[in-house]
Amino acid sequence: MYFNNIIGQSFAKKYIMNSINKDKINHAYLFEGIDGVGKTTFAKEFAKYLLKIEHLENSPDYIKIEPQGASIKIAQIRNLQTDVIIKPHGDYKIYAINNAEKMTIESQNALLKTLEEPPVYVIIILITNNKNSLLDTIKSRCDIVKFLPIPSIELKKYLEDRGIEEKKASILSTFSRGSISKALELSDSSDFMIMREDIQNYIQIMLEKNVVDILELPNKLDKYKDNILEVLDITINYFRDIMMIKENIDKSMIINIDKITYLQNMSKKINYSQVSKIIDIIEETKKKLRSNCNFNLSVQVMALNIYEVIK
């Protein structure tokens, strides 16, 4: 059965199967959701169903378009426009445009002409993690199918089925935020667990309120310069867990549940208002770093601001 190897995505499955059962296949679809939730795999399964084949690799009726370098260029869309004129071997000719948000404005305007008057056998599937990067005129001509993050319990089972130990699978399923590819990436990374331990140490340093140690944090974080945003995300998760403990929220909502004793101890060193302010400071630091602000300066300011909150 098609779509059986897709984890989660009950809405997408139901939506597409309803279209198939009612014989209302659209000429254009927009598959939108975060990376790693099965959009590309789903597009392939949809294509297999329509083309009545088991393997797409050698099918001339399934054409995959990927960015060339940083973008999908107008020349690639013009090639598509030339190709759509050639009739398929079967009932359909399917074009899957991956990372569609990387189409230039010129590319999108060119594609719009095909979307407005496609040949009867053509189906175009746009796959994106950010539909807001696409022109409204493009979106209005597509059936938009939303792909949601994979629920933690389903992702945990998927990881366990791949041979990952239960405790580790539980941790990965929460930190990956519903992304299968992110969970698998973390599962192969021996650095991930080390990073978590380091972050716990950094938080403990903060909450000991020693200004000298706190001002050393930028130097300690320097080794994570290349993935500092991920480090800050994990740090925020720890502080949110501390906030939940202080609010006596159900433990099932705690991300770092394997560190519950540590979290309970840390929660005694800080009040709710301070936790909230620290999270805001870290979020602001993330914004600065995304805007290419100086790493050392941004992290130093963060450390100073956190000290001002907890001193």
Image (cartoon, rainbow, N blue to C red):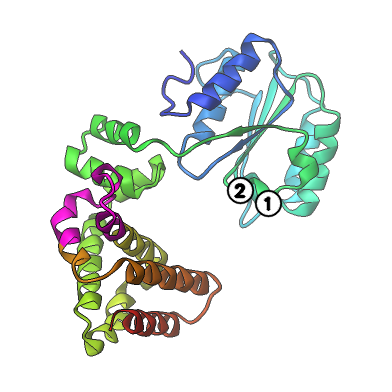
- The residue depicted at 54 percent of the width and 19 percent of the height is 14
| Residue 258 horizontal/vertical position (percent) | 18, 50
Viewer-side residue, 108 vs 86: 108
| Residue 279 horizontal/vertical position (percent) | 39, 67
Relative placement, left or right, of 167 versus 187 is left
Task: Say which element carries label 2.
Answer: loop
| CB contact under 8 Å: marks 2 and 1 | yes
Q: Quadrant of the rendered structure where residue 48 is?
A: top right
| Label 1 Cα neighbours within 10 Å, binned few <14 / some 14-19 / many ≥20 | some
Q: Quadrant of the rendered structure where residue 224 is?
A: bottom left
Viewer-side residue, 39 vs 150: 150
In the figure, 122 relative to 207: above or below? above
**Residue hosting label 1:** 133
- The residue depicted at 76 percent of the width and 42 percent of the height is 77
**Residue type of the residue flagged with mark 2:** Asn
| Residue 297 horizontal/vertical position (percent) | 44, 85
Relative placement, left or right, of 73 versus 130 is right
Most extreme residue toward the bottom, as rendered? Answer: 212
Q: Quadrant of the C terminus?
A: bottom left
Can the viewer see residue 132?
Answer: yes
In the image, the segment drawn in magenta is: 241-264
- The residue depicted at 80 percent of the width and 19 percent of the height is 120
Residue 257 magenta: yes
| Label 2 Cα neighbours within 10 Å, binned few <14 / some 14-19 / many ≥20 | some
In the figure, 175 relative to 194: above or below? above
Relative placement, left or right, of 8 versus 248 is right
- The residue depicted at 65 percent of the width and 16 percent of the height is 19
**Residue type of the residue flagged with mark 1:** Ser
In the figure, 125 relative to 181: above or below? above
Main SS of the magenta part reads helix
**Disc 2 versus disc 1: distance between alpha carbons?**
6 Å
